[in-house]
Amino acid sequence: MRNYNLFKEKLAFSIKQSEIHLKRIDEAFEFLKEYYNFPISEKEFEEILINKTHLAFADQIIYRFSKAQDSIGAKVIKSFLLYEGEDINKPFLDLLERFEKLQILNIEDWYAFREIRNEIAHEYEDDSNKAVDIINSIYKSKEKLKNILIKIKEISGL
């Protein structure tokens, strides 16, 4: 017999962790918006590189996005499906297709999030154009990640 309370607890915990990452992203963008317009230009990013405090906030955005995408992909999606009584021993694409059918996410968006995360993993620091693209992509994508969590919470009753 499945322990739905345990699955619900794991789901709630995973969602909370992801929400913390997304909250930190928002807080960092709010701080940087006091000094820069988003999406930022390469010139503005050069200014961020000079200011250690601003750079720390930009790094937080990049780090937290990577953590949020990992957390949602590795934990939230699987926890939700287990809570719903579904088999998760399938290729990840099958899990994403199930989420798309439930209108929780768009697979193309998910692959865009994953691409951003992969770009982060490949040392963006050596290429300021790449860093600008990553920060701007995160700025444009963060609401979609939040909406995934909102929809999961609505469906699961959390």
Image: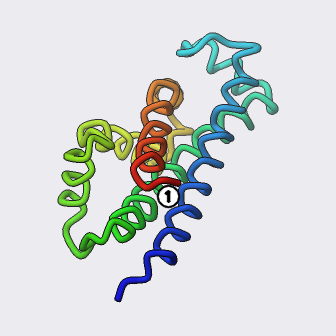
Question: In this rendering, is residue 81 above or below 144?
Answer: below
Question: Residue 109, position in %: x, y?
Answer: 31, 36
Residue shown at 80% from the left, 32% from the top: 52
Q: Quadrant of the N terminus?
A: bottom left
Q: Nearer the viewer, residue 70 or 46?
A: 70
Residue at numbered disc 1: 71
Residue shown at 20% from the left, 71% from the top: 90
Q: Residues within 10 Å of mark 1 (few under 14, many from 20)?
A: some
Is 15 on the left or on the right of 147, as rendered?
Answer: right
The colour scheme used here is rainbow
Is 73 on the left or on the right of 34, as rendered?
Answer: left
Question: In this rendering, is residue 128 above or below 106?
Answer: above
Question: Residue 82, position in %: x, y?
Answer: 35, 71
Snapshot quadrant of residue 125? top right
Q: What amino acid type should be assigned to the residue bearing mark 1?
A: Ser
Number of numbered discs on residues: 1
Question: Residue 136, position in %: x, y?
Answer: 49, 24
Is 34 on the left or on the right of 114, as rendered?
Answer: right
Where disc 1 sits, the SS reads helix
Question: In this rendering, is residue 7 above or below 120?
Answer: below
Residue shown at 56% from the left, 52% from the top: 18
Question: In this rendering, is residue 17 above or below 28?
Answer: below
Q: Nearer the viewer, residue 132 or 110?
A: 110
Is 72 on the left or on the right of 88, as rendered?
Answer: right
Residue shown at 74% from the left, 37% from the top: 56
